[in-house]
């Protein structure tokens, strides 16, 4: 299992008229967690794309528990529980500064060969970086 944590602060423009984080913003928060989880493996999305690998989202789920509010600190816990194949699924838990669970969710992406525009297995270098961290307690 791979597990990372990222913290961000809710900006005013991310809230609705009630002062709660607008529901669609959580997809962006999940992306922040995902990008940082990838970076912890030793590479970035940019490097993936430059090497000819695209990773479009094919599924997104969010289960809302409590709202985050303007100026809250949100901790995004990102976990990959299974070895990736053509697809990789990231699981999320968002907490506020009081450690209240705000929501849970998941995002599934598929590895795409940029030239062929076809699904592919993850590149060898991706899997090598992934395997180094998969059973590690720390990233």
Image (spheres, rainbow, N blue to C red):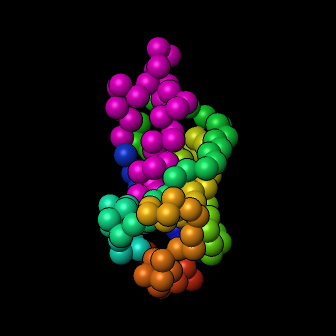
**Considering only vertical position in the picture, is 96 above or below 129?**
above
Residue 61 as seen in the image, left or right of residue 12: right
Is residue 97 something that shows in the picture?
A: no
Tag count: 0
**Considering only vertical position in the picture, is 55 above or below 47?**
above
Is residue 125 something that shows in the picture?
A: yes
Return the residue nearer the eye: 89 or 2: 89
Q: Residues in magenta? A: 9-37
Rendering coords of residue 62 (x, y %) = 63, 41
Return the residue nearer the eye: 124 or 24: 124
**Residue occupying the point 44% across, 63% down:** 115
Figure quadrant of residue 39: bottom left
The question of residue 59 being in magenta is answered with no
Rendering coords of residue 61 (x, y %) = 65, 44
- Quarter in which the N terminus is drawn: bottom right
**Considering only vertical position in the picture, is 12 above or below 136?**
above
Which residue in the rendered view is the most extreme toward the front?
116
Rendering coords of residue 64 (x, y %) = 64, 37
Which residue in the rendered view is the most extreme toward the top?
17
**Residue occupying the point 35% across, 25% down:** 13
- Quarter in which the C terminus is drawn: bottom left
Rendering coords of residue 2 (x, y %) = 54, 72
Residue 46 as seen in the image, left or right of residue 63: left
**Residue occupying the point 38% across, 35% down:** 10
């Amino acid at each position: 299992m791979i597990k990372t944590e990222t913290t961000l602060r809710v900006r005013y423009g991310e809230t609705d008229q009630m002062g709660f984080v607008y529901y669609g913003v959580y997809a962006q928060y999940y992306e922040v967690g995902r990008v940082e989880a990838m970076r912890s493996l030793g590479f970035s999305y940019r490097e993936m794309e430059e090497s000819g690998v695209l990773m479009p989202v094919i599924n997104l789920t969010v289960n809302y528990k409590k709202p985050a509010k303007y100026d809250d600190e949100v901790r995004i816990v990102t976990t990959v529980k299974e070895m990736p194949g053509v697809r990789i699924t990231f699981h999320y838990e968002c907490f506020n500064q009081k450690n209240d669970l705000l929501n849970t969710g998941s995002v599934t992406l598929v590895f795409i060969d940029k030239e062929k525009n076809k699904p592919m297995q993850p590149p060898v270098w991706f899997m090598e970086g992934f395997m180094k961290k998969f059973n590690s307690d720390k990233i």
